[in-house]
Amino acid sequence: VTVNGEKLKYSEDGLSEIDDAAGETVLQAYALPEGGVWLYAPQQDIEVIYDGRRVKLLVSNEYRDEVRGLCGNFDGEVFNDFTAPKNCILKNPYEFAASYSLPEKSCQGPAQHLRQKADKATCHEQEVLIGRVSSGKGAKAQSRHPNYVSGAKPGCTKYQAYVIKQGGKFCSSIRPQIACSITCKPTRRVEKLLQFHCVAEGVTAHQLLLDVLAKGDNAALASMKPNHSARVTLPEQCVAM
């Protein structure tokens, strides 16, 4: 293992470490059976396990929604894990993997050919929006919530439609969902399966749905028939930043 140009020797006999100029540990390493290795970068809180053929990357929840690449984007939504460097979604897993290969002459094997295919493949744009529909729940309703977090600032938490725009369709959740105001942040995020009502963009039904969102008409939104479901990540509670 080479770290910043310096080689780190490791074995199964014990944990090996390499420090920076300030004496802080940069990397820890431990040999695993059959040529594998366990690596941990404490400053970044990143753990890597290599078994001789495959690499497993483990990161803390601080990286949620902050990563991109072969391991997905860590937002809890499976449908957009194949997000390419061009910030769009590929359907073919081989083309997705090749899209992150280095375009150098040293790149051998099928990766170079697949990368060329990925550059020409249809890449689906994804856009996530937050609608304006509000449930009208205020601080009192929030404080009565069974999962209310002590210290949560009144006015931090609001409820509004969760809207996604994907593949030429405009979809809105049929019920308002929790969201944090601009001056607040989530205490943590949870995954939830939502029911959506989707319509094709540019048709009359699309404009009608936009009107419902603009008016904040919860009753009209709830009466719409769900025709799509998707897992999304939502704040559990919100606190001031």
Image (cartoon, grey):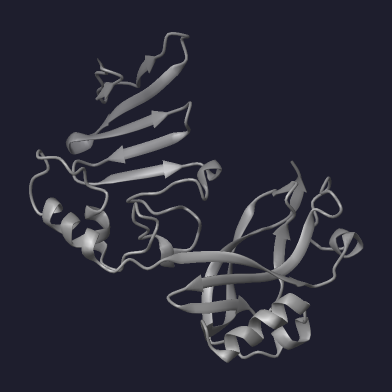
Does residue 187 appear in the picture of this structure?
Answer: yes
Residue 167: x and y in percent read: 42, 75
Q: Look at the image and tell me in which quarter the C terminus lies.
A: top right
> For the point 55% across and 65% down, which residue is it?
128
> For the point 53% across and 87% down, which residue is it?
227
The correct choice, above or below, for 170 with respect to 77 in the image is below
The correct choice, above or below, for 202 with respect to 89 in the image is below
> For the point 56% across and 78% down, which residue is it?
171
Residue 152: x and y in percent read: 81, 49
Observer-nearest of 107 and 210: 210
Q: Look at the image and tell me in which quarter the N terminus lies.
A: top left
Number of numbered labels in the structure image: 0
Does residue 27 appear to the left or right of 5 in the view shown? right
Does residue 173 appear to the left or right of 148 in the view shown? left
Observer-nearest of 123 and 24: 123
The correct choice, above or below, for 168 with respect to 224 in the image is above
Residue 78: x and y in percent read: 43, 64
The correct choice, above or below, for 98 with respect to 203 in the image is above
Does residue 174 appear in the picture of this structure?
Answer: no
Residue 12: x and y in percent read: 26, 26
> For the point 19% across and 45% down, which residue is it?
53
Does residue 111 appear to the left or right of 66 in the view shown? left
